[in-house]
């Protein structure tokens, strides 16, 4: 039986990416083709670049997901990478940096740290997107501790970074 969990960006974040991408595309298109019309070869090249970048931004939002299973974390965006559990130094629920008093966005998110001490957010794993957020965080931490292996050791410098990162993040 697999303990695999997959977290994806919620539809609202995908819509926001598409809306922002569309607005940027329109604004740049207006600047390229508007009253100060640029030379045709440059205009076509610029429009092509903006279209590709906009499509990539929306595609990344749609494709973004993190899967946690017995072997570690797999993060997929436009590219993907794998982090084995033995290379994870910590997993914590943290205050979301954009948390406000209103209910329009998530207040809590989950961050993991790799062996180099880099904190990374698990996209789609927040208190607004996942019912039973606290239980889900506990399940993820349990999966990590169960599968990180007997040779796993804390890296003191990274643990200090984790402790410092968490200060003031109720």
Image: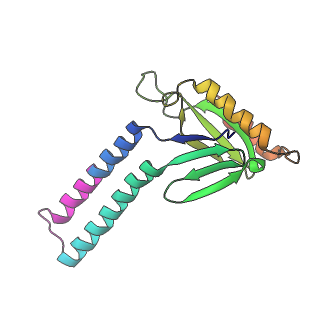
Residue 63 locus on image (x, y percent): 46, 51
Residue 28 in the image: state x and y as whole percent.
25, 59
Residue 167 visible? The answer is no
Residue at 48% x, 28% y: name it: 128
- 104 on left or right of 77: left
Residue 134 part of the magenta-drawn span: no
Give the left or right position of residue 59, taking residue 68 as reference.
left
Residue 73, percent across and down? Answer: 65, 48
Could you say which is closer to the camera, residue 157 or residue 67?
A: 67
Residue pictured at 44% horizontal, 53% vertical: 60
Asked which quadrant contains residue 154, the reply is top right
163 lies above or below 156: above
- Residue plotted at (53% across, 60% down): 79
Give the residue at the far front of this rendering: 1
Q: Which residues are magenta?
A: 23-38
The tally of labels here is 0
Q: Is residue 3 above or below residue 65?
A: above
């Amino acid at each position: 039986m697999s303990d695999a969990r997959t977290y994806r960006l919620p539809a609202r974040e995908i819509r926001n990416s598409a809306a922002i991408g569309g607005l940027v595309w329109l604004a740049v298109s207006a600047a390229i083709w508007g009253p100060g019309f640029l030379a045709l070869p440059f205009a076509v090249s610029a429009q092509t670049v903006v279209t590709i970048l906009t499509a990539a931004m929306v595609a990344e939002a749609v494709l973004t997901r993190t899967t946690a299973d017995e072997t570690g974390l797999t993060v997929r965006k436009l590219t993907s990478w794998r982090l084995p559990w033995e290379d994870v130094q910590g997993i914590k629920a943290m205050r979301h940096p954009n948390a406000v008093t209103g209910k329009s966005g998530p207040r809590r998110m989950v961050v993991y740290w790799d062996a180099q001490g880099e904190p990374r957010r698990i996209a789609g794993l927040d208190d607004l997107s996942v019912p039973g957020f606290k239980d889900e965080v506990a399940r993820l931490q349990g999966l990590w501790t169960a599968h990180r292996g007997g040779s796993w050791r804390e890296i003191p410098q990274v643990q200090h970074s984790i402790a410092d990162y968490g200060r003031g993040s109720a």
